[in-house]
């Protein structure tokens, strides 16, 4: 039972990125993930639609979690609309036991008008959490991988459990399910 005393009350503070003068200049931003880099730095990764019809995963940093400075782009989508990495977004970053960072993200080619994107999950690796090298597909979908039980695998959260198991919780659709919300 939820009582009035047990419900958190959130208070609006301000925009960090988004369509507001002085903020991020991307056409659209979304699907943010924030990690604590060290004792004084938060880093936010987020998807961004750029003016040149490309997408990117960008990052901003903050020392207090309220005031953010956009620093740059960590990954950029392909220019070719038929490339399976044309649309990229939904970053989730894990700090690995060896000190490296692994980013999981969703990607798709540009779908035909009226069709949904064919999102699947890829990853990229980094020594500093800023300069990422693409690794490849982590969770593929049909028809690209005929053995996959999925027709969609998208934005998720990935982490390492206490026992060392890598865990991914992502949005997906099984091939046997009717089309609809993931």
Image (cartoon, rainbow, N blue to C red):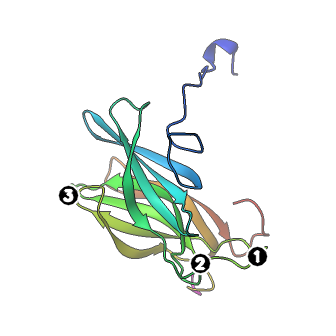
Give the Cα separation between the discs numbered 1 and 2.
Answer: 12 Å
Residue 50: image location, x then y, percent: 54, 62
Q: Quadrant of residue 102?
A: bottom left
Q: Which residue is mark 1?
A: 113
- Which one is in front in this view, the residue at disc 3 or the one at disc 2? 2
On the image, the x and y values in percent for residue 15 come to: 54, 35
**Between residues 155 and 133, which one lies in front from this camera angle?**
133
Q: Secondary structure at mark 2?
A: loop
Q: Relative to 163, is 45 on the left or the right? A: right
Task: Please tell me which residue is depicted at 69% across the width and 21% down the height of the picture.
Answer: 2
Magenta extent? 145-149
User: Of the numbered discs in the image, which one, if any, rests on residue 109?
Assistant: 2
Query: Percent position (x, y) of residue 69?
Result: 38, 41
Up the image or down, 108 lies above or below 20; here it is below
Residue 140 on the magenta span = no
Which residue bears the numbered disc 3?
Answer: 98
Q: Quadrant of the N terminus?
A: top right
Q: Main secondary structure of the magenta part?
A: loop
Numbered label attached to residue 103: none
Which residue is rendered at x = 59% and y = 25% of the image? 12
Q: Quadrant of residue 76?
A: bottom left
Q: State the separation of the CA atoms marked 3 and 1.
A: 43 Å
């Amino acid at each position: 039972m939820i009582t009035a005393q047990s419900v958190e009350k959130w208070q609006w503070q301000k925009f960090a990125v988004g369509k507001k003068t002085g903020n991020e200049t991307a056409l659209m931003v979304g699907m943010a993930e924030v990690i604590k880099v060290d004792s004084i730095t938060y880093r936010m990764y987020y998807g961004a639609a750029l003016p040149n019809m490309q997408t990117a995963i960008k990052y901003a940093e903050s020392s207090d979690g309220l005031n953010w400075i956009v620093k740059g782009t960590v990954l950029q989508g392909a220019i070719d609309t038929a490339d399976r990495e044309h649309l990229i977004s939904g970053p989730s970053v894990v700090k690995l036991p060896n000190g490296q960072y692994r980013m999981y993200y969703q990607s798709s080619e540009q779908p035909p008008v009226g069709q949904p994107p064919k999102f699947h999950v890829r990853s990229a690796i980094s020594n500093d959490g800023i300069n990422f090298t693409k690794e490849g597909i982590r969770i593929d979908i049909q028809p690209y991988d005929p053995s996959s039980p999925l027709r969609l695998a998208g934005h998720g959260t990935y982490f390492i459990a206490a026992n060392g198991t890598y865990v991914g919780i992502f949005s997906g659709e099984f091939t046997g399910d009717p089309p609809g919300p993931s």
